Amino acid sequence: MKYQKQEIEEIYNLPITTLIYRAQETHHRHQDPSGVQTCALKSIKTGSCPEDCKYCPQSAHYNTFVESERLLDIESILDDARQAAREGASRFCMGAAWKCVPKGEPFEKVLKTTSEVRNLGMEVCCTLGSMTKDQASRLKEAGCTVYNHNLDTSRDFYGEIITTRSYDERLETIQNAREAGLEICSGGILGMGEEVSDRLEMLRELANMNPQPESVPINSLVPVEGTPMADNEKVDGIEFVRIIATTRILMPKAMVRLSAGRTEMSDELQTLCFLAGANSIFLGDRLLTTENPQSTEDLALLKKLGLHLLDPEKARTIHRSSDVESKELASIEA
């Protein structure tokens, strides 16, 4: 059975106390309720991207602060991976500003880097753009654990933010990664001018995937001067928490990642997000090209809240556990 639009709207619009209670109930039933998965994200090839995503400072279509960089050398990437591991990250994510995964030497270099990072004992996530089935298989063989490819928003609103890649192309890449045996990390961005209905439709698309994504990053737009969204208003905090809670209820076994925009969030708002079911963050002061809280700040907050770093094997156990019909947890009692 698949989720319908009305069902998700009913969940989202519950009184906030009930909504968070339901999210907590789901979280405790399917997850380590005090565990937080920590990841690090590194831009291994920056800028000059041919895509026209209106939120992105790496797009070649806009004049932003981002300076283009070629694909980094392997040892430089490994230095960052080792540092991330020392700071507590269990997963190292590598992002490259490409429309499509390239052929030839650049891809061979990514494969070698993936193997080297995996040899450090870390999980490896890649986000490299559109990807063929063969490329997905080779990434898997090299040791890649997860492929990130965000839907960003609803199908209806998608054309308002991106014209250089279709929604179906994104879904095809996700399917290619899934068929290769890679875990899926896919979520979206709030604050791009979309309606709440667009956010919920994005969640419906993700929740109706079979299987559901193992990781769902929820980003708050970081407006960047030079992009068409430089003057967008900040997302309402309560609306953000509602989306986190709804995501948790719809996708019980997913790691719900509190992603971009945390530098603008108070400790109290982040705590509400954890209460609503978020259980993963990025460590490190940069997320590709945008700012992120210092690792020391994040670790101090987790300690204050009595939360601990989630062991990677614990996360994998959650994903591999027997499927439970999530809709029973999302049902609305009369």
Image: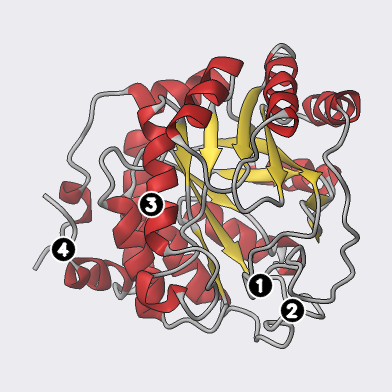
Secondary structure of the residue carrying tag 3 is helix
Residue 274, horizontal then vertical, whole percent: 54, 52
- Please, what is the three-letter code of the amino acid marked with disc 4? Ile
Q: Is residue 5 above or below residue 95?
A: below
Horizontal side of residue 269 vs 61, given as left or right: left
Indicate which disc, 3 or 4, sits on the residue closer to the N terminus. Answer: 3
Mark 1, Cα crowd under 10 Å, few <14 / some 14-19 / many 20+, is: many
Per the image, the residue denoted by label 4 is 332
Q: Are there few (<14), some (14-19), or many (20+) residues within 10 Å of tag 4?
A: few
Is 209 positioned to the left or the right of 136 in the image?
left
Q: Earlier in the sequence, mark 4 or mark 1?
A: 1
Report the mark closest to the observer, 3 or 4.
3
* In this view, 323 is above or below 155: above
Residue 39 x, y percent position in the rendering: 67, 37
* Residue lying at 50% horizontally and 54% vertically, measured from the top left: 275
Q: Quickly name the residue at label 2.
A: 227
Q: Between marks 3 and 2, how big is the CA–CA gap?
A: 25 Å
Q: Which residue is mark 1?
A: 55
